[in-house]
Image (tube, rainbow, N blue to C red):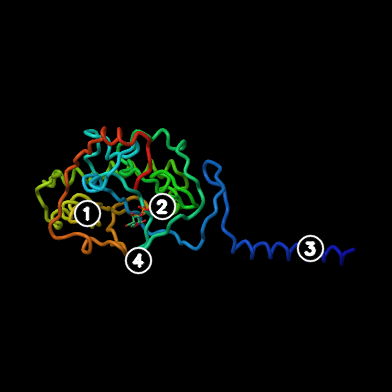
Amino acid sequence: MAFSCRRSLLVLEFLFVTFLSVSAFLPETGRLAGDDVIEVNRSQREFDYFALSLQWPGTYCRGTRHCCSKNACCRGSNAPTHFTIHGLWPDYNDGSWPSCCYRSDFNEKEISTLMDGLEKYWPSLSCGSPSSCHGGKGSFWGHEWEKHGTCSSPVFHDEYNYFLTTLNIYLKHNVTDVLYKAGYVASNSDKYPLGGIVTAIQNAFHINPEVVCKKGAIDEIRICFYKDFKPRDCVGSKDVTSKKSCPKYVSLPEYTPLDGEAMFLKMPSDRDVL
Ligand code: U2P
């Protein structure tokens, strides 16, 4: 009797140890706010810092050929004239970054109370539908949440906090205003020294930003933060560095509204056109 009891205990012990060692190699699953079951991709280590990437509509919208309701470039005189949010990206100090860290399908309902702010400060500047992490296509916000937001753990665990905090950080660091006060205003004729633009941001936030250009025009400005959202220097990313992509004198193009109505008349349905 004592022997069979000890044998059962040994079997249980063996099963327990086996479970522990096997589970160490399985994707971690757990429950997050909103009761989502998550699968964490352990192969991507925790990020080092955040980059808030801002896009300049004057440059981005020059590439718009067709209109649709979701594209803020198509808002005519109401189109954004300030830097808008591209995304809040968890990054590594070596210039690379994690992406699509666990499965959490974007649910717009979770951020419905933030819609006004998101439409104004974080609109899509394209009619395209970016790919989501797990197959298929989705909205710009869905793409940013799934690709970057899911990698921002342990700072954020849910969509709502990711989008809310990004809006707050953006509103606290008004790059458009900083450049405006330093005399760098949207213009289709003037060019500005890249060094002057960088210095204006350095003076305002005491950090080195990253500037990305397209055809001599400012395309994006990135400002970076520690995990507690204190500003810090950005690390030039592997593919685009300010030195590589920007000339010494850059433009900050004015937004020229498309003939939106004519575009809509030609294309009555919101066709996805990249
Ligand atoms: O720079 C081109 C694209 O690479 C992604 N990117 C870039 C820098 C960085 O720190 N993190 C990052 O993800 C961006 O991809 P997206 O979010 O647009 O899919 C960026 O557009």
Q: Report the disc number at residue 197.
A: none
Residue under label 1, please give it: 206
Describe residue 234's horizontal placement relative to residue 32 as left or right.
left
**Which residue does the image show at 15% across and 44% down from the upper left?**
186
Residue under label 4, please give it: 94
The type of residue carrying mark 4 is: Asp
- Residue extending farthest to the left is 190
**Which residue does the image show at 18% across and 53% down from the upper left?**
217
Q: Nearer the viewer, mark 1 or mark 2?
A: 2
Q: Nearer the viewer, mark 3 or mark 2?
A: 2
First along the sequence among labels 4 and 1: 4
Residue under label 2, please give it: 148
Separation (CA) of disc 4 from disc 2: 17 Å
The foreground one among 111 and 206 is 111
The foreground one among 3 and 49 is 49
Depicted 13 relative to depicted 202: above or below: below
- Residue extending farthest to the right is 1
* Crowding near the residue tagged with mark 4, few <14, some 14–19, many ≥20 C-alpha atoms within 10 Å: few
Residue under label 3, please give it: 9
Separation (CA) of disc 4 from disc 3: 49 Å
Disc 2 under 8 Å from ligand 1? The reply is yes
* Crowding near the residue tagged with mark 1, few <14, some 14–19, many ≥20 C-alpha atoms within 10 Å: few
First along the sequence among labels 4 and 3: 3
Q: Quadrant of the N terminus?
A: bottom right
The type of residue carrying mark 3 is: Leu
**Which residue does the image show at 23% across and 41% down from the upper left?**
82
Separation (CA) of disc 4 from disc 1: 21 Å
The type of residue carrying mark 1 is: His
Separation (CA) of disc 1 from disc 3: 62 Å
Residue 69, percent across and down? 34, 35
Residue 230, percent across and down? 31, 51
The type of residue carrying mark 2 is: His
